[in-house]
Amino acid sequence: MSAAAGMAPRPVLLAARDLTRRFQGLIAVDNVSFELREGEILGLIGPNGAGKTTLVSLISGTFAPSAGELEFAGQRIETLRPYRRARLGIARTFQVMKPFPGLSALENVTVGALFGTARLSGRAAAREEARALLDFTGLGHRADQRAEDLGGPDRKRLELAKALAMRPRLLLLDEVMAGLNPVEVDEVVELILRIRARGITILVIEHVVRAIRRLSDRVMVLHHGEKIAEDDPATVLQDPRVIEAYLGKRRQ
Amino acid sequence: MSGNPEPPVLNIRGLRAGYGQLHVLEDIALEVRRGEIVALVGSNGAGKTTLLRAVSRLIEATGTLEMEGQNLLALRPEQVFGLGLVQVPEGRQLFHRMSVEENLRIGANRRRDHAGVAESFERVFTLFPILRERRRQLAGNLSGGEQQMCALARALMAAPKLLLVDEMSLGLAPVIVDQLLVILAEIRDQGVTVLLVEQDVFAAFSVADRAYLMETGRIVRAGNVADLRDDPEVQRAYLGVEGA
């Protein structure tokens, strides 16, 4: 359960080999290979339209790959339906948060606890789990509020709590920092580090560079669907190709 | 601009606004002068979007709200728009199934000066060459950065005096945000005044002349960006600078 990563090599949890996805003429993800080790946080950055969200959708099962292989915990998953992958322990968040409207924060998270790997049978057990997760994510005092009434950072916390209720081994985070100011970003960074400390492996798409720098053990860069860099954050964020394609000069 | 007796483009004094019985904004004072980019920053829920809604006359408000000396409180949203107060909404809000050119034309919908509209097309295509290339494509098929450019261009097609730009950087790659900031400065240099609401405080401060900081429905600080950037309290609460 140690938060420290990159000591002894840990077992590979997710392996992508030559993953490709075409949409008619467009190659959204082009021959991408990478590995995620247990307990690791991998940052995924790249310009808008680079294929980041498509890659996450290939892992979660929303899209099937046009070619390539995906292995999760030693099992091939590229042909499995999304719900089967969720039960194996793959959970994701979405760029546009979609809480169940009309339900309270607690009920939203309870729904997650009734599915996923845990599939807690009793509603009471699911609610108990949901309450614990609201406390963990700092939303305990908002449990009875309607989900759609939650503001920016609280909405992100809810999205994380919902995903955690699936008891995932791998969490795919798609731009959870968007729309937060720097101080709010730091709060969510702290929360994500605590999630990793629970032993959960994380793939994080983010445009907020200060978050990527603080969170990631390694950073992978996509550009026009291709992987153009993969290394520790300091190295990647100094890579001239990455500055040219993604970072711009002001951030240096 | 100093010594110029003209009234500010936007003058807000003692403004109070909210939803029904709920007062979200209390005693807001904010001024935007001709040729400025003014940033409005604050955490989520501070009331920034509510202030924009009050300025655009979408919600009830009391106090002073003037554009170039003219009282806006009695006006309807389309009248305020007609005076040249134009919003670039959060999330772009383009018409996704219409072409880029059709989206831009909608921005000019209320204008009757056909020669001026043609000139505005030329001006936005010069500012955003990619939109000229893509003018026949559906707006929904543009990348996030291109969509934000299209939203800015659509607003410019209305020949605005004051642009209200809400969360321009949302979900965009840093290099794209930088391009947009450069273009925003160009827009200002062409004579359009800008009020920029932005969560990315670093980005906002890099382009703005002055800034207002908002907390729980009030303006808690205002000043030149250079002074605010060095203010330890601002660094702690808004920039997240370590050790401040």
Image: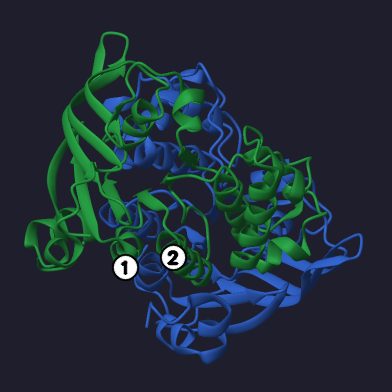
Chain colours: A blue, B green
Q: Residue B137: image x %, image y %?
A: 81, 54
- Is A82 situated left or right of B150 in this image? right
Residue visible at 32% across and 20% down? B73
Q: Residue B160: image x %, image y %?
A: 48, 44
Label 1 SS: helix
Which residue is tagged 1? B206
Q: In this rendering, is residue B102 above or below A48? A: above
Is the residue marked by circle 2 packed among few (<14), some (14-19), or many (20+) residues within 10 Å? some
Cβ–Cβ below 8 Å for labels 2 and 1? Answer: yes
Residue visible at 55% across and 38% down? A118
Q: In this rendering, is residue B243 above or below B112? A: below
Residue visible at 19% across and 47% down? B213
Residue visible at 17% across and 67% down? B226
Name the residue furthest right: A24
Is the residue marked by circle 1 packed among few (<14), some (14-19), or many (20+) residues within 10 Å? some
- Going by the numbered disc 1, the residue's amino acid type is Ser
Q: Quadrant of the N terminus of chain A?
A: bottom left
Query: Disc 2 is attached to a residue of which chain?
Result: B
Q: In front here: A13 or A62?
A: A62
Q: Residue B92: image x %, image y %?
A: 57, 44
The CA span between labels 2 and 1 is 8 Å
Q: Residue B122: tell me if it is visible.
A: yes
Which residue is tagged 2? B181
